[in-house]
Amino acid sequence: MCYAIPGQITEINGKTVTVDYFGEKKTAINELSKIRIGDYVFAQGGFLISTVEEKEARETLAAWEELFFALKKTDIRISRLVRGAEGIDKKFSAILDKAAEGRQLKSDELLRLLKAEDHKELDMLYKTANFLRQKHLTNACCVHGIIEFSNCCQNDCAYCGIRRSSEIKRYRMSDEEILATAAEAIDKYGFKALVLQAGEDPAFPVDRIAALIKEIKARHAVLIFISVGEVGKEGLAKLYQAGARGLLARFETSNPALYANLHPGDKLQDRIDELKHAYELGYLILTGGLIGLPTQTEVDLLNDILLAKELHTEMYSFGPVLPDGPPTSLVLKTLAVARIVDPMAKILVTTGFETLDPAARRLGLLAGGNSVMLNVTPLKYRKLYGIYPDRAHVEEEIGDQIKETLDLLRSLGRAPTDLGIK
């Protein structure tokens, strides 16, 4: 199963191309050479990653076409919004009506949504978020792979299970293991986007990571995201030059005092500056916050969502603090309000949320989410990447993860693909 559907180029405008997918037009950034109108291509995250032979593309499209439109019908049916539900506060209902119509909500209105507790109100909030997701992004759902190549870290962040002071078994994958894992994920399982993740490990300086990215890109057509902590302006530039196009780095919280408690000796502004500089370089930004921090308020959560929007976030990543965890409803409210604030964003259903609640993936996708991440780290290492206890999927073979994910997506009418940007 390919996690991208080939499309055909219909227009070229400098570095931007228009790609047709079954009549839907999307734009993408072109970094490939010798692209012509009529060529078939794969895109991820708004970047062209490869051309596709016409015969292969037509065969893939023929296999997909009937299913693609059938899935769309299912998604439209599930995401249909019926207004005026009985038993809901009129002011709350008016806020959701305003959101559904595409009008910008005020801070106090967004805060009212985050403070909702009534189950009927929550249900309507999630349905409104799902309606907006379908309206703006149709039924595409990003399915990315992640390789956790080291659990060694020089930092001592209070919430993190692989922090320097944690007494855990450490590991570092060799360069050969990382390359082999990437090859299996791309060639055998069809992933078109991979995250390379680790703690801030001195054994993996920027130059070593850049060499790995360059080698993966030389061997495979794939979109590479990095998640290795802060690397500074020079480091970001080196990794971008090597071929990385996405940065996954949560700011954790927009509250400087809370951030100082989580990150001894670090400043929130430094993390924000790194994200801003990455965006200026051309990176896709994947960021967000933690839900359920001690003393955290709904105002903090709203500020987290608004900061993510301000940072030009491509994919919102909000997950629960574990092991204790907040209520499932608080995570879902955060995802739903993020969708309302930024209807065009990708919103990730995190592994942390799936650890908190076994039904999280379905619930999150029905509350505005449209992205999942599957763990392709070798099993012998995966269980050692203990950022929190009892992580979901640590014992599951990647083939089983894929089947479970595809079955769920089909039941919801979602297509496991990233069609690029609008």
Image (cartoon, rainbow, N blue to C red):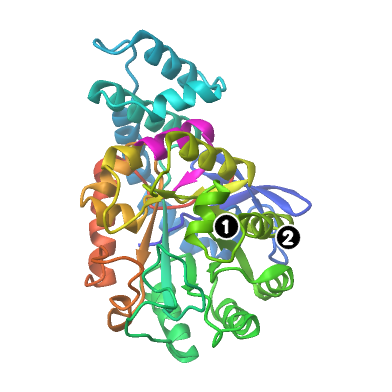
- Closer to us: 298 or 408: 298
Residue 63: tell me if it is visible.
yes
Q: Which residue is mark 1?
A: 40
Quarter of the figure that contains the C terminus: top right
Q: Nearer the viewer, residue 166 or 93?
A: 166
**Residue 64 % position (x, y):** 37, 50
- Name the residue carrying label 2: 281
Is 200 drawn above or below residue 132 in the view shown? below
Q: Tell whether position 165 is magenta.
A: no
Residues at marks 1 and 2 touching, judged by CB atoms closer than 8 Å: no
Callout 1 amino acid: Tyr
Question: Which residues, given as a range, are shown in magenta?
Answer: 333-348
Q: Amino acid at mark 2?
A: Leu
From what the image shows, is residue 122 above or below residue 334? above
Q: Residue at x 41, y 66 (%)?
A: 145
**Quadrant of the rendering where the N terminus is positioned:** bottom left
Image position, residue 270 (x, y; %): 66, 60
Which residue is at 40% across, 40% downward? Answer: 335
The extreme right residue here reads 14
Residue 331, by quadrant, is top left
Kindly report which numbered mark, 1 or 2, lies closer to the viewer in this rendering: 2
Image x and y of residue 87, in percent:
24, 11
Helix, strand or loop at mark 1: strand
